[in-house]
Image: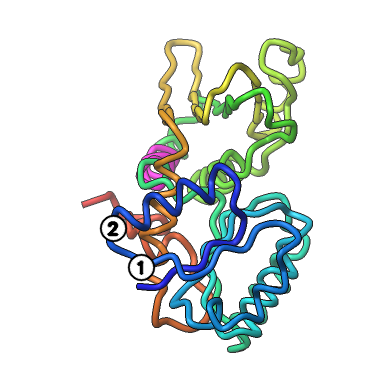
Amino acid sequence: MKIAIVGYGKMGKMIEEAALSRGHEICCVIDAAETEKFDSPQFREADVAIDFSIPSAEPENVERCFAAGVPVVCGTTGWKDSLPIMERKARNGEGTLLWSSNFSVGVNIFRAVNRYLARIMAGEPQYNPVLTEVHHIHKLDHPSGTAVTLAEDLIEADSRTLSWQDAGEEGKAIPGDLEKMAEEHILPVLYRREGEVPGIHSITWDSPQDSITITHSAHSRRGFALGAVIAAEWLAGRKGLYTIEDVFRYNFADDSPLE
């Protein structure tokens, strides 16, 4: 399979490594300020493009993939205001798009566990959830895109939790504010920035008697790269709009127990 890489930073280089290790060919690499390459024969011959660039460039990048007729796997977060426009175009047959906040196989298994536990907790009102995400000090935005996805999954699965809220930095949140969120059935999302942590996401269900915590810890970003390549393998030859749930089928939306 021929893969084009859009965004050639640390993540782009890991995607290249993962793709080559699985026997694929990198036919085009487009880094910042190289947008003319979207019109090149090398890009147009790609079976799929994998895009991990910057949020401000993403809408134009996806548009240019659509114009070239190249399906695109997108892992860039922070452009959700424009994302619905691209999703609508893909649904209308103007291009092929698969976007996710996290392509890690482990994270997507974790999402399924999160939903399953949340369905159980819908019938246990003594427990209240808190979500915490930890990333490296270079990540300035919060909460992470993965944390938002996990929060939305939990709310969809747990009928008691009505919404989520950015509760600020872990250890600096005012306990009274967290208690008020619990009373109002709001999921607090806390963050922490330290060292070179690639990503840790934890969900704790706390009661007066005990606590239950589930955690996913990434050892490196290579898992994200591998998952993106797996998604690209799945997307090649398809048309329309897809999500990571189509690739990793772990009963995300199934209300019955996992089999």
Report the residue at 46% width, 46% height from top. 14
36 or 89, nearer to the observer: 36
Toward which corner of the image does residue 237 lie, by quadrant?
bottom left
| Distance from the alpha carbon under mark 1 to that under mark 2 | 10 Å
Does the residue at mark 1 contact the one at mark 2 (Cβ under 8 Å)? yes
Q: Secondary structure at mark 2?
A: loop
Q: Is residue 5 above or below residue 203?
A: below
Toward which corner of the image does residue 246 lie, by quadrant?
bottom left
Please report the bounds of the magenta region as a residue range: 108-118
**Which residue is labeled 2 in the image?**
22
In magenta segment, residue 109: yes
Which amino acid type is shown beneath numbered disc 1? Glu
**Which residue is labeled 1 in the image?**
233
Q: How many residues crowd around disc 2 within 10 Å: few (fewer than 14), some, or many (20 or more)? A: few
Which amino acid type is shown beneath numbered disc 2? Arg
Quadrant in which the N terminus is drawn: bottom left
Q: How many residues crowd around disc 1 within 10 Å: few (fewer than 14), some, or many (20 or more)? A: some
